[in-house]
Image: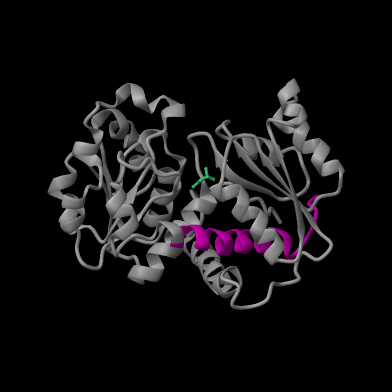
Amino acid sequence: MDRDFLQIEGMSRAELEAMLLAAESNLPIAEQRQPRKHLLDGRVVANLFLEDSTRTRCSFETAVHRLGGQVFTLTAAGSSASKGEGLIDTALNVEAMGVGAIVIRTSISGGPAMVAKRVRIPVINAGDGRHEHPTQGLLDLVTLRESLGDLTGRRIGIVGDIANSRVAHSAVQGLSILGANVVLIGPPTLVNKSQGLIAKTSDKISITHDLDSIIGELDAIMLLRIQMERGASSGISDDYRTMYGLTQDRAKRLQSHAVVLHPGPVNRGIEIDDAVADEHGGIRILRQVTHGVAARMAVLEWALASQATRG
Ligand code: CP
């Protein structure tokens, strides 16, 4: 059976809910209230992080440790990727060392899927270009469910650089599968290209360019990082914060139960003001990070529980 975890798009509701339940059951271990598992005793997981990362890379490493396994991480600097070795050749060489699974972060949209066609071990997507960041999607859903319960009919606003955001793409897919209403919010340059995403998901997704008109109706607001490295800055005026930043004034207009998510890294003073990030009662940014360990444990368990190799 295929045990790659490449995207949330295409998962059934049952599959997604099973993964979320598994992640939620791992929380006591992620929080070190329960001892680690031994599922990966004697197993090695390879992290190929050919694009920079703090949260995803370290939480995959932590997740492997919490499952009793060992992990090594290759980055572009310091590996033969810097000499021009491609993603697939790198993955084939790592597979030949006998690792149990490969976790891949790459700027190439579809890169993990290409690798999965060539190797016989599970491949896990840790964020590929503008395509998806499925384990981020899982941790976002775990965080929302912890605060809001069943997400059916809940109104979730995603603010910012939707067009460039693999985080948004996975979140929209997951929220759509779980029956939430999603509002994509941002300037036309960053949001209007999302029509294809809407067409692929459901009629419960809408677009607005006016955050102030809707902020008081949201159950949750997910702020996205403006991705300068993907060219987002060319379409953004200096007053992004004025129109779309979660300022203190705007935060006061959130419903009392509403929660605030951000995948990180946070551009303080652009997407969110310092005082809101540090003091608002609805902030769940570090909670998301903890949930990332639990979610990645669940994905690794799913990928590695029944078999080490395919074919
Ligand atoms: N959320 C996220 O993907 O952060 P990193 O780029 O630090 O992994």
| Residue 229 horizontal/vertical position (percent) | 46, 28
Closer to the camera, 176 or 157? 157
Q: Residue at x 16, y 51 (%)?
A: 249
Q: Residue furthest right?
A: 97
| Residue 271 horizontal/vertical position (percent) | 31, 42
| Residue 223 horizontal/vertical position (percent) | 33, 47
Question: How many marks on residues?
Answer: 0
Is 180 located above or below residue 123 in the figure?
A: below
Q: Residue at x 76, y 49 (%)?
A: 121
- Say which quarter of the image contains residue 224: top left
Q: Is residue 289 magenta?
A: yes
Q: Residue at x 52, y 34 (%)?
A: 129
> What's the coloring here?
one colour
The magenta stretch spans which residues? 287-311
Q: Which SS does the magenta portion mostly show?
A: helix
Q: Is residue 92 left or right of residue 173?
A: right
Is 248 located above or below residue 23 in the figure?
A: above
Q: Residue at x 86, y 44 (%)?
A: 97
Quarter of the image where the N terminus is located: bottom right
| Residue 234 horizontal/vertical position (percent) | 34, 21
- Say which quarter of the image contains residue 41: bottom right
Is 20 located above or below residue 234 in the figure?
A: below
- Say which quarter of the image contains residue 108: top right
Q: Is residue 218 left or right of residue 83?
A: left
Closer to the camera, 29 or 181? 29
